[in-house]
Image (cartoon, helix red, strand yellow):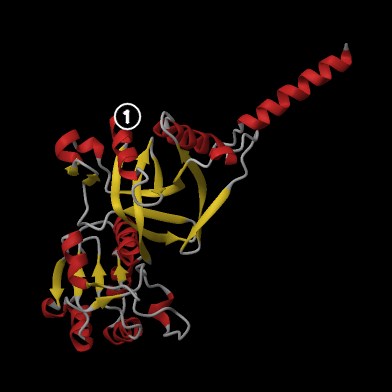
Amino acid sequence: MEKSIVIKDIVRAFALEVLYGEEKLDQLIKQSNARRPGLEFNKYLDFFPKEHVFVLGENEIKYLHSLSDEERDIRVENVVKYNPPCIIVTDGQEGLKYLTKYCKAKEIPLLRTNDLNYEFIRKIDAYLIKRLAPEIAIHGVCVNVSGIGVLLRGDSGVGKSETAHSLLGRGHRLVADDIVVLKKLSPQTLLGTHNVTNKELLSLRSIGLLNVVRMYGRKAFQDESRIALDIELTKWKGDSLYNDLEVETKFTTYMDVEIPYIQIQLKPGRDVVGLIEAAVNNFYLKQQGYSAAEEFIKRIEKEAGQDKGN
């Protein structure tokens, strides 16, 4: 299902001034990034993407100011042919009567902000990508462990929420319990967050719902986190555990984004929280290019070389 937001959402999010189109703010925005027109001013091109929010900065407005009335009409006409849901003028630019005229003719809301163009483009792109990103909801828990986003999955009753609660006691943060919303921000980036209804709430069997912020303070909760690890908690399976020097990396795929996957088996007395912290720290070191297994092998090779020398 294609996602969309209304123009009113970005007006509120960025406190934009409405120069024209107050009654048109319920129109939809479906494209996940804004465009700063350049070539679009010169000629209408069929292969250019359409229906993007257009952002005009000081350079664009000064360029339009420099044109004759006839030439300016042609340039603006070229831009509105791309059917932008709205046009946003940055840098607090003024003298926009001619732009307002075209926006009225095409019923395109005209908005303005005092933000610098490059700053506003960065902010609105990040906002649109998050709001319009493809998303799915999965059953599990999302926590942020030492700055790393972790999905905790497993069968109902396996202890995901209890494990998350123990992680909070060690200074880590809850993102979402029971239902985790995953958003695909890019081919390599998956964001985990709550579904608003379960924001700040953790459900523990025999205890009930806890508001972790009320109980443990703001540091116990994080609104969203990039997912780096997918950890499945399973029941103990006897002799199925391996003890290789270097565990081969496995992956889980969500919306075509691959996430490193680890399985941790549960057993009374096993320090699951400590194992999750170890998995996160080991993942971080691998991202930095360090492998304990490689270091161990190098030590063995060095010792073997010394023995031959003797």
Q: Is residue 232 above or below residue 6?
A: above
| Residue for badge 1 | 170
Give the quarter of the image for residue 64: bottom left
On screen, residue 160 above or below 23: above
Quarter holding the N terminus is bottom left
Which residue is depicted at the point 40% across and 45% down? 150
Left or right relative to 250: residue 272: left
- Residue 13, x across and y down, in percent: 19, 60
Residue 94 visible somewhere in the drawing: no
The residue lying furthest to the front in this view is 238
Residue at 29% x, 82% y is: 68
**The C terminus, quarter of image:** top right
Q: Position of residue 33 (x, y in %)?
A: 36, 67
Quarter of the figure with residue 267: top left
Query: From the viewer's perspective, is 108 left or right of 309?
Result: left
Residue 264 visible in the displayed image? yes
